[in-house]
Amino acid sequence: MVDNRYATALVIGSVLSLMATVYLSVAVGTQHWYQYSCPPGKREGSNATELRDEFIREVDEKTYSEILFRLNGTLGLWWRCILVPGRTHWFKEPDPKMERQCVSFTLSQQFSPKYKHLGNPNSEEDLLRTYLWRCQFLLPLASLALVFLGGLVGVCACLCRSFTPTLGVGVLHLLAGLCTLGTVCCFLAGVDLLQQYSPPPEGVVGSLGWSLYLALISFPLQMMAAALFLWAARSHRKNYSRMTAYRVA
């Protein structure tokens, strides 16, 4: 029989794990990790239609970064987006409705090398930015996979009526939390290095987006869930050992 304290810890840990998984999944699938705000004067002086078409077809990092600066762009793990006027048929509206145009990074682009001179594939490869980009793509997937594996282990433990696998569930959540933290750190470091090579124009302000904050929130939730699982497993093992020793005596 499981003590009520351990059962409560397992329930709370499961709820925290579920919340962290939802937050991280939303963060990975959205594009508001980092956003740029361009002054209205510079935005009005640019041809948004031409920039939009170039943004859609262009895969060069330097080109799409400059367009992100000029058109209030947002950047995510899988997406890059700009804010442009909506398409009209034959007339130009004085106050057009703005819409967000997004382009996803393909799998090959996620693993493509980064260069020290943006837009010049003949220049030296920047290994640090290359591996930071790949890690920010792979680590959140690893985090979600570890939580999913921990859930499977937990379900099997419930079916077998065994408390021992709870220790493994806690370790998996601990590793998942570290992967989540690594994702945020790699993304911020990559953005900082990108802005060193291609600094935003004067007046353009960059800020963290709500998607990144969701990932940040999921990290402590995963760590708290891991702590609860590890505490429950360790305490239950100690209590079980004492009960066994008492019965033997």
Image: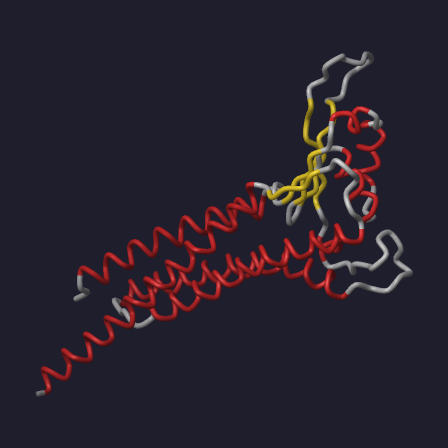
Q: Residue at x 86, y 56 (%)?
A: 117
> Quick check: 46 left or right of 32?
right
Vertical placement of residue 246 versus 234, above or below: below
Q: How many marks?
A: 0
Q: Quadrant of the C terminus?
A: bottom left
Q: Quadrant of residue 206?
A: top right
Q: How is the image coloured?
A: secondary structure
> Quick check: 9 left or right of 249?
right
Q: 87 or 200, which lies in front?
A: 200
Residue 175's spot in the image, x, y percent? 48, 66
Residue 91's spot in the image, x, y percent? 81, 12
Which residue reaches farthest front? 202
Residue 182's spot in the image, x, y percent? 57, 61
Vertical placement of residue 35 versus 163, above or below: above
Q: Residue at x 78, y 28 (%)?
A: 43
Q: 193 or 57, which lies in front?
A: 193
Q: Residue at x 73, y 56 (%)?
A: 193
Q: 72 or 130, which lies in front?
A: 72
Q: Residue at x 19, y 76 (%)?
A: 240
Which residue reaches farthest bottom? 249
Q: Quadrant of residue 244?
A: bottom left
Q: Quadrant of residue 246?
A: bottom left
